Amino acid sequence: MTFDPAAVSGNWNYPTRMIVGPGRISELANACRSLGMTRPLLITDPGIAGLPMIADALAANKAAGLPTGLFSEVKGNPVGRNVEDGVRAYRDGGHDGVIAFGGGSGLDAAKAVALMVGQDRPVWDFEDVGDNWTRVNEAGMAPVVAVPTTAGTGSEVGRASVITNEQTHEKKIIFHPNMLPAVVISDAELTVGLPPHITAATGVDAFVHCFEAYCAPGYHPMAEGIALEGMRLIREFLPRAYRDGGDIEARGQMLVAASMGATAFQKGLGGVHSIAHAVGAMYDTHHGLTNAVLLPYVMQFNRPAIEGRMGLLCHMLGLNDTGYDAVLEWVMKFRAELGIPGTLAEIKVPDDRSGDVGKLAESDPSTGCNPRPMNAADMEAVFLNAVHGRL
């Protein structure tokens, strides 16, 4: 066999400083100070802003001599206006750092605000296309401490934010290497109050991150190893967290698995995310739930390109069989066990704009890493299958 150096080459980056364990939110003020913050702005979404965990964090920072502002005007799918309003709040309040607190929406919006506080271009100029990231004035970026409250997106260890352009109804990936938070606090106690259906949707989202990263083409054995272990953890601990929200071990392991998924997907994602981004931009659906619904339909499209990789995954999932069919059957049962809807129609997504979904999905950055080439017609067909439950 001829050795091809290009086949074993790549550019790899791995996460940041992570403070992990129950109760470690008590270290928030110290984490902020370690980055030179004296007056941080805590950014989250409205659903979390009124919870005791936010009041407690603000009070603890104040008691530690670190007065902290609050901004929570963030949609479930963050839009450009949310980022603009957050930048205004940051500047008006004289803040010098950001605490990104919450699920994927809060974390993504906060990271984008931290990027934009020192820029003189619109946020869309930093879309993850070509070398757009080099336009960023790095000196103007604010430091970020990230505190995830859901185990799904893994945005706390990501170098990008997904922001919707309301004018074009497109989700854009805004990227810069320094958008990676400098410190992460993963405290399982903050996720205890997460309702079962959100636990399930975000948890399967983390599984999709791992699965698509594992199946993406290219050479990145470290990402693949992390993806495989992430899927094993999710198989073992997501049902426990779903059944008993107070299971601290399960909650903690799911936080870790979510961060592992986002670490792994630097190798690439794929068609699940491409279509989910389009559907979310057009119909404002929950991103994690949309991914969870779409997964088996995209798997079926990708089968010729991924079935050779399913043997090892079967082993990691503890399955007796070793083929693609065994993985698909397990995915279907796992989703049902967690109450994930079987079709997009069940989450009120119609089929009347399927062509637009296909075109938007084809242009999504995740499409380039799908294991099998997908064009707009392919995306539309998979979307329609997912709406109508055709496997």
Image (spheres, helix red, strand yellow):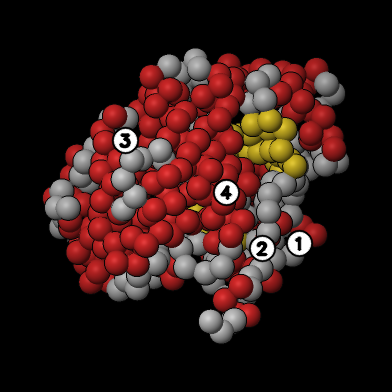
- Label 3 and label 1: CA atoms lie apart by 43 Å
Q: Which quadrant of the figure has residue 382?
A: bottom left
Residue at image point 49% right, 15% down: 246
The residue under label 2 is: 12
Which residue is labeled 1 in the image? 138
Q: Earlier in the sequence, mark 4 or mark 1?
A: 1
In the rendered image, the vertical position of residue 14 relative to residue 17, given as above or below: below
Disc 4 and disc 3: Cα gap in Å? 21 Å
The numbered mark at residue 334 is 3
Q: Which residue corresponds to mark 4?
A: 226
**Quarter of image, res 242:** top left
Q: Tell me if 271 is positioned left or right of 182 in this view.
A: left
Q: Are marks 4 and 2 in contact (CB under 8 Å)?
A: no
Pointers 1 and 2 in contact (CB under 8 A)? no
Q: What is the spatial separation of the Cα atoms under label 3 and label 2, in whole angstroms?
A: 32 Å
Between disc 3 and disc 1, the foreground one is 3
Give, as a three-letter code, the residue at label 3. Phe
Q: Marks 1 and 2: which is nearer the front? A: 2
Local SS, label 1: helix
Label 4 or label 3, whichever comes before in sequence order: 4
